[in-house]
Every structure is written in structure tokens, then in C-alpha cells.
Image (tube, helix red, strand yellow):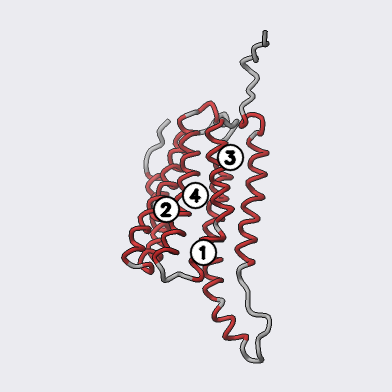
Amino acid sequence: MSTPTPEWEDETPGAIIGPDRLLAFGDAVFAIAITLLALDITVPGDLEVGALGTALHRALSDIGAYLLSFVVIGVLWLSQHTLFHRVARLDSCLLYLYLALLAVIAALPFPTRLISEYADTTAATAVYAGSIAVASGLITAMTLRLLLRPALATPGTVPRRLRIAVYEGLVMVVVFAASVPLAFVSPKIAQYWWLAAIPARVWLSHLTRSVPPRP
């Protein structure tokens, strides 16, 4: 006859790993993804005299794609740290959502390369936008999970802050997801539409400061 597991002994994967250990693993994935982005910036090694300027000009698209993805990954990295600052313990849902996020982050060099080499195509723009929308959606889902399961949050976590984080995440999801159908009209319009995330987040930040706090 098996001995029942005590109620206090949580043997789920999330409880065994712990938030700090999982976050350390995630930081490594983010760092590797950013490093791989930089490796895509190259010029030919057998250039003739005077051809370096032309090669550097051709590399501008690679540099632009790198900077774009660096900013996006940086924002996602900061968002995950803000989230984990409020996580006291993991459950299976948070664990699997985070692993899915890391899978997307690790693969981001691929859509970045697509947007660098085929920026004027619908497919590359849609794949890139879809990837960012999925990554933002996964962080938003984790924040929503924490809001719906207060027992997982650190003591003193203010629900209002979690709600604001959910709204900020939804802004990113909506902006990038909406650009996917726009890419079928014009890839350039879709790419310029990504800039809408900046004023939208600023407006949301101003709006949330002006609303009286709720418990």
C-alpha cells in the first residue's frame, strides 16, 4: 500500500524547478538568441579595394533587422523579469507557458533573417509579426495566470499592477497580430504599423496613472 504524499509536498514540475532556476535558464536562452542575431551581420571576406563601402551599405538591412529584434527581445526580457519578480511559485501552466515562450525566443533569429533578406515580401513580414505576437501573447497569458491565481504571486503583489501588465501585453499582441493581414496589403505599411506600439503603450501608461487605484 503506497504512502500518500503530504499536502505540503508539491511534486509538480514547476514546484521542483522553482522560479529562480527557471528564470536563470530563460536568461541564457535570451542571451543566446541576441548573440545569434549579431552573427547574421557579415560582409564578404574577399572584397576588392574600395568595395567595403558598398558591402557595408548592403549590410544595412541586416543591421536594421538586428536592431529591431534586439529592441523587441529586450522588451520581452524586461517583461519576463518584471513578471518573475511577482512569482512566488510555479504551477504546470506557468511552466509550460514559459517553455513555449523560450521556444519562440530561441527561434527569433530565423524570422529576423527573413525580414532582413525579404523585407518587401508578405511572407517574411507576416512570419516576423506573428512570431512577436505569439511571444507577447505568452507573457501576457502568464501574467493573466498570476492574476487569476493569487496563491502563485509573491505576498504584497498588487492586482492592479498585474492588470496593467496584461493591458500592456495585449497592446503588443494587437499591434503585431493586426499587422499580419496588413502585410497582405502592403508589407511596408505593416512594418510601419509596428511603430504604433510605442504611442499605444505611452497612452496606456498615462491612462493607468490617471485612473484611481483599485484593490
Which mark, residue 135?
A: 4
Labels 3, 2: front one: 3
The residue under the point 63% across, 61% down is 36
Measured from the top left, where is residue 161 in percent x and y?
47, 39
Labels 4, 3: front one: 4
Q: Are marks 1 and 3 in contact (CB under 8 Å)?
A: no
Labels 4, 2: front one: 4
Mark 1 / mark 4, whichever is N-terminal: 1
Could you tell me the amino acid type at mark 4? Ala
Q: Are marks 1 and 4 in contact (CB under 8 Å)?
A: no
Measured from the top left, where is residue 78 in percent x and y?
56, 50
Q: Which residue is mark 2?
A: 201
Q: Quadrant of residue 74?
A: bottom right
Q: Which residue is mark 1?
A: 68
Name the element at disc 2: helix
Could you tell me the amino acid type at mark 2? Arg
Q: Which residue is mark 3?
A: 84
Could you tell me the amino acid type at mark 1? Leu
Mark 4 / mark 2, whichever is N-terminal: 4
What distance separates the C-alpha of mark 4 from that of mark 2?
17 Å
Measured from the top left, where is residue 48 in percent x and y?
66, 90
